[in-house]
Amino acid sequence: MPKMKTNRASAKRFKKTASGGFKAGQAFTSHRFHGKTKKQRRQLRGTAMMNKVNVKRYAKILSNL
């Protein structure tokens, strides 16, 4: 059986953590900040952890990370 290939688009967007989870950059942070509150802008900084529901599916796609 052939080797599983890593999905390259996903590999560029997600990083695997030591505990097996995935972190990614926040969405909604590229433009139109005038329509967002200061609190929203502050909370959109940095990275976010992937939901536990999706971790199992992405672990297969990103098996070689």
Image: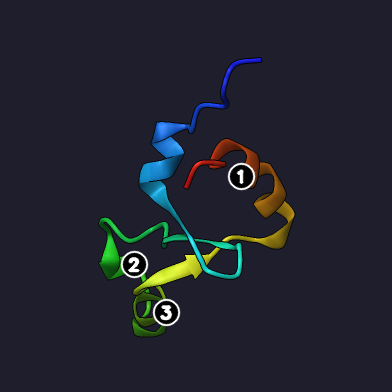
Q: Are marks 3 and 2 in contact (CB under 8 Å)?
A: no
User: Label 3 belongs to which residue?
Assistant: 43
Q: On the rendered structure, is 28 left or right of 4?
A: left
Q: Around disc 2, counting alpha carbons within 10 Å, would you say few (fewer than 14), some (14 to 19), or many (20 or more)?
A: few
Mark 3, mark 2: which one is toward the viewer? 3
Q: Around disc 1, counting alpha carbons within 10 Å, would you say few (fewer than 14), some (14 to 19), or many (20 or more)?
A: some
Q: What secondary structure is found at the residue carrying circle 2?
A: helix
Q: Earlier in the sequence, mark 1 or mark 3?
A: 3
User: Label 2 belongs to which residue?
Assistant: 35
Residue under the point 45% across and 40% down: 10
- Label 1 sits on what residue type? Tyr
- Label 3 sits on what residue type? Gln
Q: What secondary structure is found at the residue carrying circle 3?
A: helix
Task: Farthest residue to the front: give it.
Answer: 1
Residue under the point 58% across and 60% down: 50
Query: Residue 45 at x, y = what percent?
Result: 34, 74
Compare residues 56 and 25 and report the one nearer the observer. Answer: 56
